[in-house]
Amino acid sequence: MAGTRKPVVEVRRSQRRRRTVSAYRDGERVVVLIPDQFSRAEESEWVDRMLARLAAREGRLARSDAELLARATRLINLYLPEHGPAAVPASVRWVTNQNGRWGSCTPADRTIRISHRIQDMPDWVIDYVLLHELAHLVVPSHNAEFWALVGRYPKTERARGYLEGVAATSGVPLTD
């Protein structure tokens, strides 16, 4: 590919990793996490594989703020229909400055921000995070009424488990 620069790659070996390999972008570089026991050949193979996966993922991440708002509208209609305008956000947008949470909501100005870290997660996980934040427009706290609203989403427990697993493997404790 003419004009395409290969990113700087940092390989981090872990004695705790046994079989899994993951990669993520950190600014201009790509960090690839591999098991410590991998040979140099395996490392090279996995770096190439993970760079290709990242490129493919980034190519399909055309998820826009407009798509996020359309998704929010669909979720409101499905799971919060009786709350009508109270559940409608003034804005919903992807942000890159949330590394300690999946999403956030400011009920006072009705804005919702969703971390870019979930853009490549399954749709049902994105829907859960978005519905969680939409429910805060109706109930600002994490009380029983709030969790009852969030619990209307049929994949709530599955999504929470998925996110807990991601948080545990990333080593970054995340908050609701």
Image (tube, helix red, strand yellow):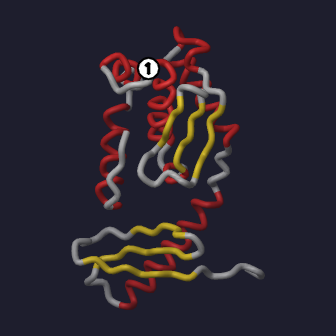
Picture residue at 31% right of the left edge, 84% below the top? 38
Q: Residue furthest top?
A: 82
In the rendering, at what x and y percent does residue 173 appear?
32, 53
Measured from the top left, where is residue 123 in percent x and y?
A: 51, 41
Q: Residue at x 31, y 61 (%)?
A: 171
Name the element at disc 1: loop
Determine whether 128 is above or below 64 in the image. above
Three-letter amino acid code of the residue under disc 1:
Val
Residue 153 location, x and y as percent? Answer: 41, 25
Say if 73 sits above or below 41 in the image: above
Q: Is residue 57 left or right of residue 144?
A: right
How far across and how far down the image is residue 40, in percent?
37, 91
- Residue 98 lies, with reference to residue 68, above or below; the image says below
Quadrant containing the N terminus is bottom right
Corner quadrant of residue 140? top left
161 vs 56, nearest the viewer: 161
- Residue at 35% x, 27% y is 142
Residue matched to label 1: 139
Single out the residue that lies furthest toward the bottom.
40
Q: Quadrant of the C terminus?
A: top left
